[in-house]
Amino acid sequence: MPRTIAIGDIHGCLDALNALLDAIQPTRDDTIVTVGDYVDRGPDSKGVLERLLQLEQTTNLVPLMGNHEEMLIAVLERQMEPYNWLNHGGVETMDSYGFAGDLACVPKSHRDFLTRLGDFYENDTHFIVHANYDPALPLAEQNSDLLRWVKISNVLPGPHISGKKAIVGHTHDRQGEIFEVPHLVCIDTFCYGGKWLTALDLETGKVWQAHPNGSMREENESERRT
């Protein structure tokens, strides 16, 4: 049976992403939704984008845009000075590309990938956004700053008008734990900070988590709630 699996904020943690995908073994019939923040802070942003490009060839990948991709695009397109981005993990990203003063170190295939990232994903029961949402607005009418920048620790949204369950990232838990209320699950579990990269099967509630060193743990929804 085809699965729909959401993956939380990766932040350059390629070893954790590879371990997660090895455990999940996505097929061509599965849908893998990545919530954004592929780059910055962790050690191998270049490798993460390359791995996602490979993943597009073997499964139905739905990559969403995070605030860190938004900053990177703005820098690459010369729409924003790099200083603020560099202070939020951009240094590690440029190091992974071997930056030596020329932004051409970021290849066209990676730039093209960044520009086609989506704002949200939804199916019959769930929707996924990077950061937050307005519960009173349809997903297509959401403000992009809210979708990418506002932490749920600042504004916890109520149930969405669609009645669907929200899956979000962006607001990391420093203990590496999933935050869950009846209408919302946050799967940013602080991988770049030494905790976990989380994947969640939307239908079954099964969770896979990979440590930055590649070690794994798994649990079912019933185990998570005990």
Image (cartoon, grey):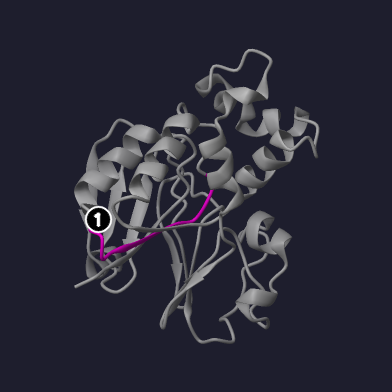
Position of 164 compared to 195: left or right? right
Looking at the image, residue 45 lies above or below residue 141: above
Secondary structure at badge 1 equals loop
Q: Is residue 31 magenta?
A: yes
Position of 42 compared to 80: left or right? left
x, y percent for residue 56:
37, 51
Residue to which mark 1 is pinned: 26
Q: Give the quadrant of residue 26.
A: bottom left
Instruction: Name the residue at 49% across, 49% down.
Output: 173
- Residue 10 versus residue 155: which sits nearer the camera? 10
- Residue 188 versus residue 66: which sits nearer the camera? 66
Q: Is residue 45 magenta?
A: no
Looking at the image, residue 39 lies above or below residue 180: above
The magenta segment: 27-37
Instruction: Name the residue at 80% across, 39% down.
Output: 79
Instruction: Name the residue at 54% across, 86% down.
Output: 162
Q: Give the quadrant of residue 125.
A: bottom left
**Can residue 72 be seen at all in this image of the molecule?**
yes
- Residue 91 versus residue 191: which sits nearer the camera? 91
Quadrant in the picture for the C terminus: bottom left
* Outermost residue, top side: 100
Q: Amino acid at mark 1?
A: Pro
Q: Main secondary structure of the magenta part?
A: loop
**Can residue 211 be seen at all in this image of the molecule?**
no
Looking at the image, residue 78 lies above or below residue 220: above
x, y percent for residue 191:
42, 40
x, y percent for residue 193:
47, 35
**Number of disc labels:** 1
Instruction: Name the residue at 46% across, 38% down.
Output: 49
